[in-house]
């Protein structure tokens, strides 16, 4: 299978820059898969799990924040607010954040407080999903 350059960039770092065979990303319209020589595309990304397919059937997963993805004939650029590999995620911190979000949501907040609690909960769930995938790969 042919490959293309995938770059994942956040405001703080280049989270990933390698040749890959496939990437799937969460868009506002659903999950999109990109292979080599995909038609040009520019789309909005939402918080979620980004899956990278490398040679030898190796797969990587990153938890990402919202942003954008540009697909050209031989390169995919992902610009997101945040991107974390499983080994960069602090499980205890994520579990504490999830508990905090659940407590905030039980209080039935409104307006900005509701949006903030929902966002914290969503980010926590995504991070835990990426951590669990890594554990399965290691086992």
Image (cartoon, rainbow, N blue to C red):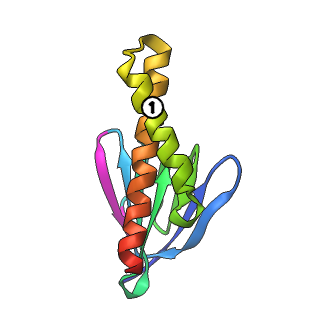
Q: State the residue at coordinates (42%, 70%).
A: 134
Of 103 and 115, nearer the camera is 103
Placement of 125 over or under 71, stated as above or below: above
Q: State the residue at coordinates (44%, 12%).
A: 111
Magenta span has 17? no
Mark 1 crowd level (few <14, some 14–19, many ≥20, 10 Å Cα):
many
Q: What stretch is highlighted in magenta?
A: 29-38
In the drawing, does residue 46 fall left or right of residue 81? left
In the drawing, does residue 23 fall left or right of residue 69? left
Q: Is residue 78 visible?
A: no
| Res. 132 image quadrant | bottom left
Q: How many marks?
A: 1
Placement of 7 over or under 116, stated as above or below: below
- Residue carrying label 1: 101
Q: Is residue 133 visible?
A: yes
Magenta span has 30? yes
Placement of 45 over or under 49, stated as above or below: above
The x and y percentages for residue 25 are 39, 54
């Amino acid at each position: 299978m042919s490959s293309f350059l995938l770059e994942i960039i956040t405001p703080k770092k280049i989270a990933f820059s390698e040749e890959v065979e496939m990437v799937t990303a969460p868009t506002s319209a659903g999950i999109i898969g990109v292979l080599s020589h995909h038609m040009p595309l520019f789309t909005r990304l939402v918080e979620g799990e980004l899956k990278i397919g490398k040679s030898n059937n190796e797969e990587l997963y990153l938890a990402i924040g919202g942003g954008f993805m540009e697909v050209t004939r031989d390169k995919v650029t992902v610009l997101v607010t945040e991107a974390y590999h499983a080994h960069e995620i602090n499980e205890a911190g994520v579990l504490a954040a999830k508990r905090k979000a659940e407590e905030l949501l039980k209080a039935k907040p409104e307006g900005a407080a509701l949006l903030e609690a929902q966002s914290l909960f969503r980010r926590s769930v995504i991070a835990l999903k990426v951590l669990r995938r890594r554990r399965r790969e290691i086992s």
